[in-house]
């Protein structure tokens, strides 16, 4: 389920002249999409549905201007219920009628263009958190915003181009986001 969402072409908040915010620290290093050239970033907040379960997907992608097309991605996916304002961020199993899927709730990855270099995921006992708030703008658009902190551990690394060599655990802290929400559920 999660990989399918990552490969979809989803709504880009920059397309509606909205000032998106997506920032965090990764092991103390700044990851701030808000302050970069908008051509080198992608930020997404989307709700999708699989069978009878909805998911909120938050995605922040930043290209490294010095090592193009290298990019870093922080992804968060949680089961969506509008009344839930706080989500623990570990890995979880969600059951569907057709079977079950393992949902990686928090993830960090590095890419060289379309080739994945490394992948880090949360573990079930992760003590991370993710808050969700909704605001409706005057034009009817909805904005999702909140904070996040979580730890991910290396799942795989297949390339010496990784900027995270020697970092098997990443602490993603002081995370903040404010993005236009694209609701892709069918009415």
Image (cartoon, rainbow, N blue to C red):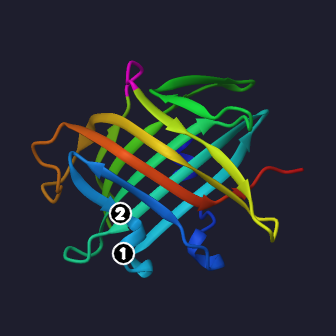
Q: Is residue 66 above or below residue 87?
A: below
Magenta stretch, residue numbers: 123-127
Tell me what residue is drawn at x 59 percent, y 69 percent: 13
User: Label 2 belongs to which residue?
Assistant: 32
Residue at disc 1, secondary structure: loop
Horizontal and vertical percent position of residue 51: 77, 35
Q: Does 105 lie within the magenta span?
A: no
Q: Residue 21 location in percent, x, y?
A: 49, 63
Regarding mark 2 in the picture, which secondary structure is present there?
strand
User: Which dot marks residue 36?
Assistant: 1
Q: How far apart are the two marked residues, 2 and 1, measured between alpha carbons?
A: 7 Å
Q: Position of residue 25 (x, y in %)?
A: 29, 51
Residue 16 versus residue 88 in the image, above or below: below
Q: Is residue 12 left or right of residue 184?
A: left
**Closest to the observer: 137 or 109?**
137
Q: Quadrant of residue 123?
A: top left
Residue depicted at x 36% and y 46%: 174
In the rendered view, tell whether residue 87 sits above or below residue 12: above
Is disc 1 surrounded by few (<14), some (14 to 19) or many (20+) residues within 10 Å?
few
Relative depth, front residue between 2 and 16: 16
Q: Residue 87's spot in the image, x, y percent? A: 55, 30
Q: Quadrant of the N terminus?
A: top right
Of 128 and 187, nearer the camera is: 128
Q: Residue at x 58, y 32 (%)?
A: 86
| Res 25 visible | yes
Q: Picture quarter containing residue 40?
A: bottom left
Whether pointer 2 and pointer 1 mark residues with C-beta atoms closer than 8 Å, the reply is: yes
Query: Residue lying furthest right in this view?
Result: 187
Q: Is residue 53 above or below residue 175?
A: above
């Amino acid at each position: 389920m999660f990989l399918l969402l990552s490969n979809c072409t989803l709504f880009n908040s920059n397309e509606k002249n909205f000032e998106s915010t997506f920032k965090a620290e990764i092991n103390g290093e700044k990851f701030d999409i808000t302050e970069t050239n908008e051509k080198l970033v992608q930020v997404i907040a989307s709700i999708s549905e699989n069978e009878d379960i909805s998911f909120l997907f938050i995605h922040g992608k930043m290209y490294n201007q010095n090592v193009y097309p290298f990019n870093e991605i922080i992804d968060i996916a949680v089961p969506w219920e509008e009344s839930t304002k706080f989500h623990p961020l570990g890995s979880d199993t969600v059951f569907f009628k057709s079977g079950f899927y393992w949902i990686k709730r928090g993830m960090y990855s590095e890419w060289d263009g379309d080739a994945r270099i490394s992948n880090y995921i949360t573990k079930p006992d992760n003590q991370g958190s993710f808050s969700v708030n909704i605001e409706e703008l005057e034009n009817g658009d909805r904005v999702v915003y909140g904070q996040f902190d979580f730890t991910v551990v290396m799942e795989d690394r297949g390339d010496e181009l990784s900027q995270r060599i020697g970092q098997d655990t990443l602490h993603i802290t002081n995370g903040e986001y404010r993005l236009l929400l694209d609701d892709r559920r069918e009415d």
